[in-house]
Image (tube, coloured by chain):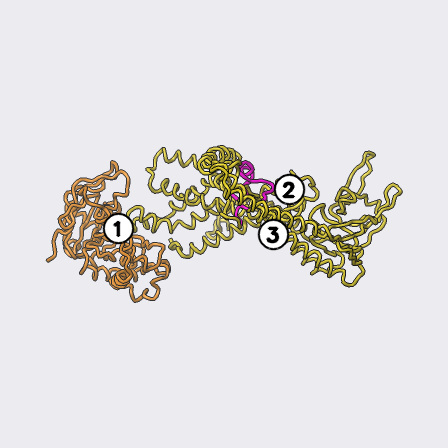
Amino acid sequence: MTREDFIAVDQFSFYYREKQALHGIDMAIPERQVTALIGPSGCGKSTLLRNMNRMNDLVEGVRHEGDIRLNGHSLYDPKVEVISLRKRVGMVFQKYNPFAKTVYENVVFSLRVAGRNRKRELDEVVERSLRSAALWDEVKDRLHDSAFGLSGGQQQRLCIARAIANQPEILLMDEPCAALDPTATLKIEALIRELKAQFTIVIVTHNMEQATRCSDRTAFLYMGRLIEYGDTKQVFENPRQDETEAYISGRFS
Amino acid sequence: MADSPTAFATTGRSRTGEPFVWLTAAGLTVGVILTLGLLALVMVKGLESFWPARLLVLEVERDGQASRIAGYEVQERTRRDLDGVSHEEVQVFRGNRELYGEKFVFLDRADIRGTSRPGDLLLVERLEGGNVIGRAVALEFGDGGRVGADAPEFRERLEALIDENQDRRDELEDIEKEQIGRNAKQVKELRLRERTAGPSEAIRVELAELQAEFERLDRERGGIRERLEADHFLLEAADGGELRIAGGELLHVFRPNEAGFFGRLGEMLRRGWSFLSTDPREANTEGGVYPAIFGTVVMTLVMSLFVTPFGVVAAIYLREYAKQGPLVRAVRISVNNLAGVPSIVFGVFGLAFFIYFVGGVVDDAFFPNSEEPVYKSGGILWASLTLALLTVPVVIVATEEALAAVPRGVREAALACGASKWQAIQRVVLPASLPGILTGVILAMARGAGEVAPLMLVGVVKSAPDLPIDGTSPFVHPERQFMHLGFHIYDLGFQSPDSEAAKPMVFATTLLLIAIVVVMNLAAIVIRNRLRKKYATSSF
């Protein structure tokens, strides 16, 4: 039974120093589906995403109001250890960013930092993760070469493999195809559709077609507010709000 | 056709800035020429000092007196005498100090009546008194034997004499440095025990044994010395003066006028090798610079051993952990300014803090019975620490730059994988910034290896009897004074009693110091490039 409010965003507001970036966002993200966050630049969609694994803690002078709950547990509970949270929430970034290590070591990084070093386990994880990221066949002979020898698309898929190696529950993707060419983009999109069987995926994208192609739900944010949130088909074909319609028809960006 | 759409507007050269391209190019050219000129001068002069010159016999008539001088030309000069008449003079090295007092002589070109180049002239290197130039006469042996220079076995016997005396000198050194040294150390320990625990029969017996051993060694030493003095090599100088060189003094005999190009090349290589591998003689003006090379390399390596971890750790805190604010900015500015403090100030600080304070504490704690200061005097450890202090800003600045250059995305990726901040730094950020850190270490090494002024206060000497690492236990002697090529150059050039004789050595030593710095830098660069390949950064 999948849970409808697997990630529950509850009256969540967020401030960078004096500037308010998010205004009381309320949304429930369902388990094992793909939820796309769309909206013009600076609308707060990346901020929202980066709060789901508390990546924004790194920025100085931030504060929040409201709460985000993951499977019913508050992320911002003072007792929560950020490291254990991030182990349950994987993240893929806009710019592919493999470490200056071998392909193998990139994938097992999250296990190594957790102190899991048994070779058999690591070998299994590498093969499983790379297969899930549809990369195994391309790199199985160069696992011990530098990750920088791979093409851009392969590097991004390697980053996905790295993010899912520790079997997180949620996968956050911040414009994962922004730095890739169309062919590589299509591969990643196909991968996203496959991965939703195992993970709850939240993806930020600038690309409308991408949102329609691979997401089940779409949320449109504008000026830090959640304007519209619903099934992707409905949002794109029958937007209830004028701003949504204006945005998806390209009248402003 | 001026208004034709194909015509472009043109501007004057000065407005497009092209003259500035030339200006920048000129700046670079001047810099390159100056650097290359310096290197070429040092190179030519340094290598020239090893090239064996042909020996000449000059017929000189001065003030009505004729004389013959054998030697080789060193340089030419024009001298103006009191009457305003200028004389072309040539400086000749003629050696044979016991005959002439001075090894160099200036001759007026006008006085030289004739020049010849006899093939049988010898250039003899010996332990003391400088080189000898003359014609071989005979070998005289201690047992009364004599071999004339025209005897067929003469050359063979001469070589044998040189070789066997070399063996004797090695034996003598072993006895003096190793065996007698060990004996003296044991005696000292026993005396100390006697003083602290009171006299006892066992100690007395042991002391007597050591005394007996010392006397045996001393006799052995005396015997070897006698044999070193026993045989003699007789030569005749160009003006007929007689020269007697004891067998033990002989180092090497060369016939420059007989040797062909490859013979001279071989001699040059031999001289070069002996320059690199032997100890200095004659107040550093002759012999080699081996202890100085050793001291320079060891000190630089020990310095980098100290400066690297210290600088890297400081930079990590400054860049990664410290809250960026006015305080951190002030610290950063101070660190940068530290690089501009005159190096002699670091020398004074090293003397006061490391030697007098830290060294004093160490001596009081660990060597209360020692008569001489052990760590409370200049030594290679204190010199390395002082230079580490001097070069730490370089490493800190380079490491900070390298850390800052690691893309933010990579750090975030590590944190998103569940790494703690330290894990992210240790496993991702540091490896990625290693090439940049190594660049800092390379710069620090180059700076440290070439520094002289502070070293003079914290442990460099013109002549150190022992190397800081040798075969006597405990093998590493961080408290020992040492020799350094940079200081050696200063000592040769400005402190030498015989500055003419030292001049070629100055260039040779300078060339060597530059070469060593280059080699150490190249090694570090090779290591860095390997790391860079291993951790090749992404395309953008």
Q: Identify the amino acid type marked 1.
A: Gly
Query: Going by the image, does B417 lie left or right of B382?
Result: left
Q: Give the residue number, with chain letter if any, for mark 3.
A: B277
The amino acid beneath tag 3 is Ser
Write the start and end of the magenta stretch as one range: B447-470
Palette colour of chain B: yellow
Badge 3 sits on which subunit?
Answer: B
Q: Quadrant of residue B366?
A: top left
Mark closer to the chain start, 3 or 2: 3
| Label at residue B418 | 1
Residue B415: x %, y % from top left:
28, 49
Magenta-span inclusion, residue A52: no
Chain seen in orange: A
Q: Residue at x 24, y 38 (%)?
A: A19
- Where on the picture, by quarter, is residue B119? bottom right
Q: Residues within 10 Å of mark 3 (few under 14, many from 20)?
A: some
Ranked by sequence position, the earlier of labels 2 and 1 is: 1
Tell me which residue sits at (34%, 37%) in the image. B324
- Subunit of mark 2? B
Q: CA distance from mark 2 to mark 1?
A: 62 Å
The verdict on residue B463 being magenta is yes
Q: Front-most of A16 and B239?
A: B239
Residue at (81, 34) in percent of width and height:
B82
Image coords of residue B425 (percent x, y): 34, 47
Q: Chain of mark 1?
A: B
Q: Nearer the viewer, residue A115 or B175?
A: B175
Question: Are discs 3 and 1 less than 8 Å apart at CB?
Answer: no
* Label 2 vs label 1, nearer the camera: 2
Q: Are marks 2 and 1 in contact (CB under 8 Å)?
A: no
> Which SS type dominates the magenta stretch?
loop
